[in-house]
Amino acid sequence: MNGEGKPQDHGAPHAPHAPHAPHSPHDAPPAPGPVRASVYVAGFSHKNPIPAACRIGPLLESGSIQGNDPSTGVPAATIEAQCRFMLENVRRIVEAGGGSTQDIVKVTVWMKDRSQRAALNVPWLEMFPDPASRPARHAIMAPELDMGKLIECSFTAWIP
């Protein structure tokens, strides 16, 4: 600084300002992404205004899936029947979303009594017989399940 508070000129030429570079793709507004699509299945519904699943691009996420009998809409009487209906509802929902059970990556299960997992394992092994290509599964204790529900689940699928 000189005595007047201005930068000193040391005689070096000043570099001209570079012209503004064109905007990079990172500066541009994002292109519209995949459209979110709700998935509904006949004989399967929620009491709230939500679909059975939602798909964006290859990602399919389900809502809560119960062991309800599709013909009555009420939970089956036994844990074994609820497990079968629940997994059949999973199959119907993933297929309605454009995929198959082979596209399911993870299933999260809520059970009133986790000691009853054997009732889930029977239809699970029928649906996913190959141990080399089963989806991940997490069973969570949920004693607060109500209205006759003994089990419910949600799933994530990646549908190429």
Image (spheres, helix red, strand yellow):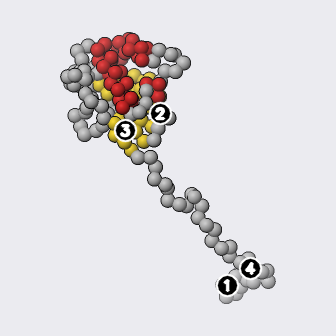
Checking the image for residue 158, the label placed there is 2
Residue at the bottom extreme of this rendering: 4
Residue denoted by label 3 = 54
**Foreground tag (4 vs 2):** 2
Q: Amino acid at mark 2?
A: Trp
Among the two numbered marks 1 and 4 on one chain, the one whose residue lies closer to the N terminus: 1
Quarter of the image for residue 152 reads: top left
Amino acid found under the numbered disc labelled 4: His
Task: Provide the secondary structure element on which disc 4 rests.
Answer: loop
User: Which circle's residue, 3 or 2, is located before the other in the chain?
Assistant: 3
Residue drawn at point x = 42 percent, y = 17 percent: 127
Q: What residue is disc 1 on?
A: 6
As drawn, the residue found furthest toward the right would be 11
* Residue type (three-letter) at the residue carrying disc 1: Lys
Q: Which class describes the residues within 10 Å of circle 4: few (<14), some (14-19), or many (20+)? A: few
Q: CA distance from mark 3 to mark 4?
A: 59 Å
Relative to residue 31, is residue 95 drawn left or right? left
Residue 42, quarter of picture: top left
Q: CA distance from mark 4 to mark 2?
A: 57 Å
The residue beneath circle 4 is 14
Q: Secondary structure at mark 2?
A: strand
Label 2 – label 1 distance at C-alpha: 63 Å
Q: Quadrant of the N terminus?
A: bottom right
Disc 1 crowd rating (10 Å Cα; few below 14, some 14-19, many 20+) is few
| Closer to the eye: label 2 or 1 | 2
- CA distance for labels 3 and 2: 12 Å
Q: Where residue 25 sits: x, y (%)?
A: 57, 58
Residue at image position (51%, 16%) is: 131
Q: Which of label 1 and label 4 is nearer to you? A: 4
